[in-house]
Image (cartoon, helix red, strand yellow):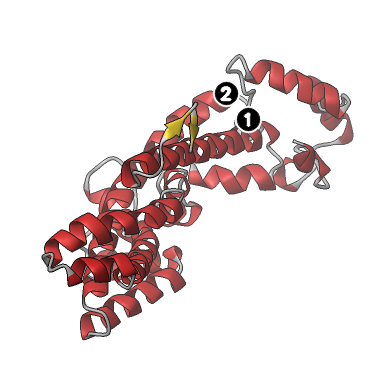
């Protein structure tokens, strides 16, 4: 809240919203922006705990809650298949690369993973439009509402997290396979499938969960580049436009949304520890 108000300029004197002085003063009084910051903060928190997050300055005829409720389902509709594809195929590619370390398959997965992390999603999206829409006329360039509108956005959006999952899965599996208890299990004559399922996969999943689950909130809150390229009416664009236009109610609401998702994700991560690692147990309401 304080950082937001510390940025030079206000919601009615920046960009296209610049207003005459008399009109600006009237708008500041209307929204209570001429009051001391502590009074504005107290008033905002009082309304927020009641579920009222105010009116977005970008769309004064709507409410912040209503705007998020109408746009976020679109972003989630892109984010969920992105998560499923990225984590499923990324995990499989990481397992294949780890079990065939230093083979041509490992080199291919590593190279593709590096490209997936270094090439921006908007570049991938642009090339998909040029090839699949402009050149071959297989898919529409953008839009929303039909199954075919999902294909290119999900592909472009899933490549980076898929590459991250593949690289980290490969790394954690290789480190686990070199551990002493795996060597001991092999020395005892256990079958490789049993070692992989009972020792390697379970122990490698702990750092995997720690690093990769927090990526889910980022995917579920949308990408402005993907939504802009494919003309998707999601929530992603508001993360940038609300900051540029000093839309204080939207900035605070989106910050709270992301913080809530991260909090839930880390809680889920701690609970998964108790399943993956028998040494971790919930004791006295805490993970111990």
In this view of the protein, which residue sits in the foreground, 188 or 159? 188
Image side of residue 28 versus residue 158, left or right = right
Q: Residues within 10 Å of mark 2 (few under 14, many from 20)?
A: some
Specify the quadrant of the image occupied by residue 246: top right
Instruction: Compare marks 2 and 1 and give the one earlier in the sequence.
Output: 1
Residue 248, image x, y percentages: 70, 35
Residue ID for mark 1: 56
Reply above or below: 253 against 213.
above
**Local secondary structure at mark 2:** loop
Is residue 232 among the parts visible in the rendering? yes
Image side of residue 263 versus residue 2, left or right = left
Image side of residue 72 versus residue 176, left or right = right
Give the Cα separation between the discs numbered 2 and 1. Answer: 6 Å
**Local secondary structure at mark 1:** loop
In this view of the protein, which residue sits in the foreground, 131 or 193? 193
Identify which residue is drawn at 51% across, 41% down: 262
Residue 191, image x, y percentages: 11, 65
Number of numbered markers: 2
**Number of the label disc, if any, that sits on residue 63:** 2
| Picture quarter with the N terminus | top right
Reply above or below: 72 against 199.
above
Residue 172, image x, y percentages: 36, 65
Image side of residue 131 versus residue 21, left or right = left
Q: Residues within 10 Å of mark 1 (few under 14, many from 20)?
A: many
Residue 286, image x, y percentages: 50, 32
Question: Do the residues under discs 2 and 1 have CB atoms within 8 angstroms?
Answer: yes
Identify which residue is drawn at 57% across, 45% down: 239
Identify which residue is drawn at 21% across, 55% down: 198
In this view of the protein, which residue sits in the foreground, 248 or 160? 160
């Amino acid at each position: 809240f304080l950082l937001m108000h510390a940025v030079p300029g206000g919601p009615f004197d920046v960009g296209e919203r610049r207003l005459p002085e008399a009109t600006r003063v009237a708008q500041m009084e209307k929204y209570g922006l001429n009051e001391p910051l502590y009074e504005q903060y107290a008033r905002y928190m009082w309304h927020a705990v009641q579920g009222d997050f105010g009116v977005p300055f970008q769309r004064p005829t709507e409410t912040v809650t209503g705007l998020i409720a109408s746009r976020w389902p679109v972003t989630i509709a892109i984010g969920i298949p992105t998560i499923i594809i990225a984590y499923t195929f990324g995990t499989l590619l990481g397992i294949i690369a780890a079990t065939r370390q230093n083979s041509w398959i490992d080199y291919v997965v590593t190279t593709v993973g590096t490209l997936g992390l270094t090439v921006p999603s908007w570049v991938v999206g642009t090339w998909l439009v040029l090839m699949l829409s402009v050149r071959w006329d297989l898919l529409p360039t953008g839009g929303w509402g039909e199954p075919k509108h999902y294909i290119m956005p999900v592909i472009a959006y899933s490549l980076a997290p898929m590459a991250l999952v593949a690289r980290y899965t490969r790394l954690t599996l290789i480190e686990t396979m070199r551990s002493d208890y795996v060597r001991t299990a092999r020395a005892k004559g256990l079958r490789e499938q049993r070692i992989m399922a009972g020792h390697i996969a379970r122990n490698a999943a702990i750092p995997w969960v720690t690093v990769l689950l927090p990526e889910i909130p980022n995917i579920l809150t949308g990408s402005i580049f993907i939504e802009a390229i494919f003309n998707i009416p999601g929530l992603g664009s508001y993360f940038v436009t609300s900051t540029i236009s000093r839309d204080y109610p939207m900035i605070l609401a989106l910050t709270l949304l992301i913080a809530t998702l991260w909090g839930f994700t880390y809680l889920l991560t701690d609970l998964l520890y108790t399943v993956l690692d028998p040494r971790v147990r919930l004791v006295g309401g805490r993970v111990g």
